Amino acid sequence: SYTVATAIEGAKTASALMGHRISEAQVAVVGATGSIGATCAEIMGREAARVMLIGRDTERLRGVAERICPNSQAELEVT
């Protein structure tokens, strides 16, 4: 979706402006159990070193982590 594309592009641009590489970065996704957050976590999981999944329902966060883990290079943390 456009929202996901904008969020990912914004994070990448901000990272570059601060002199950080996404491949070495920790990324926090707030609202990771929602459709937009879960998609952002999935995409960032392919590129970042670590992705923290943040949300109110730990069980749902674990479900998101299990779903994206096979295609993720990132260390995933559920918080």
Image: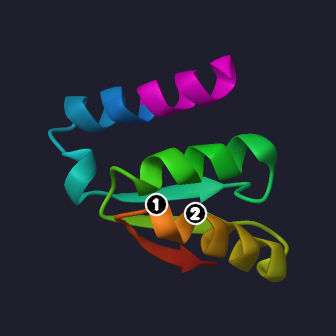
Residue depicted at x 68% and y 52%? 38
Q: Are marks 1 and 2 in contact (CB under 8 Å)?
A: yes
User: At numbered mark 2, what does the secondary structure look like: helix, strand or loop?
Assistant: helix
Residue closer to the observer: 16 or 43: 43
Return the residue at label 2.
68
Residue closer to the observer: 8 or 70: 70
Q: Looking at the picture, which amino acid does disc 2 mark?
A: Ile
Give x and y (percent) for residue 30.
66, 55
For this view, does 51 lie left or right of residue 61?
Answer: left
Q: Looking at the picture, which amino acid does disc 1 mark?
A: Asn
Residue depicted at x 29% and y 38%? 15
Give the number of the disc on residue 71: 1
Residue 5 lies in quadrant: top right
Quadrant assignment for the N terminus = top right
- Vertical side of 55 occupied by 17: above or below: above
Residue closer to the observer: 45 or 27: 45
Give x and y (percent) for residue 9.
43, 25
Give the number of the disc on residue 27: none
Q: Residues within 10 Å of mark 1 (few under 14, many from 20)?
A: few
- Vertical side of 12 occupied by 64: above or below: below
Prevalent SS, magenta region:
helix
Residue 61 lies in quadrant: bottom right
Residue depicted at x 48% and y 74%? 76
Give x and y (percent) for residue 11.
42, 35
Tell me the magenta residue range. 1-10
For this view, does 46 lie left or right of residue 77?
Answer: left
